[in-house]
Image: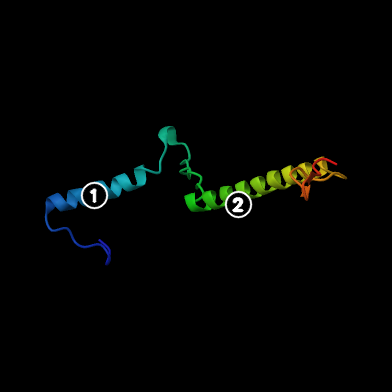
Amino acid sequence: MTELDPAPVDETSAELAHIVADTAGAADASPAGLAPVPPTVAPRRPRTALRFGVSFVAGLVLVTGIGAGALYAWSHQYDGRILPGVHAGSVDLSGM
């Protein structure tokens, strides 16, 4: 035993310590004496709050762009004409 390992109290704990020591090295070995296979690490998923924030900003930009396009098209529809619902006194100037 080394200085860091506590001495076994009885035969049962000595056997258990021996079994644990033997199986610790066996987990890294692969069948047929091949080289050990390193464990694969699962890819990390972005946090939900980050995904929500990016999606929210992207949606906001998309809605703003669509709204600006609609207003631009609507304004060009009445280029050189008076907007509907415009009156001068009792005269309707709409569409002139």
Above or below residue 2? Residue 36 is above
Report the Cα–Cα distance between label 2 and label 1.
Answer: 59 Å
Name the amino acid, label 1: His
Mark 2 and mark 1 residues within 8 Å of each other at the beta carbon: no
The residue positioned farthest toward the right in the image shown = 80
Q: Is residue 75 left or right of residue 31?
A: right
Q: Could you classify mark 2 by the number of other residues whose Cα lies within 10 Å: few (under 14), some (14-19), or many (20 or more)?
A: few
Above or below residue 54? Residue 1 is below
- Which image quarter holds the N terminus? bottom left
- Which image quarter holds the C terminus? top right
Q: Nearer the viewer, mark 2 or mark 1?
A: 2
Name the amino acid, label 2: Val
Point out residue 41 in the picture as x, y percentages from the top left corner. 48, 45
The residue positioned farthest toward the front in the image shown = 90
The residue that disc 2 covers is 57
Q: Is residue 89 left or right of residue 52?
A: right
The residue that disc 1 covers is 18
Point out residue 82 in the picture as x, y percentages from the top left corner. 82, 45
The residue positioned farthest toward the left in the image shown = 10
* Closer-to-camera residue (4/90): 90
> Which residue appears at 36% of the width and 43% of the height?
27
> Which residue appears at 30% of the width and 44% of the height?
23
Q: Is residue 15 left or right of residue 73?
A: left
> Which residue appears at 27% of the width and 63% of the height?
2
* Closer-to-camera residue (48/19): 48
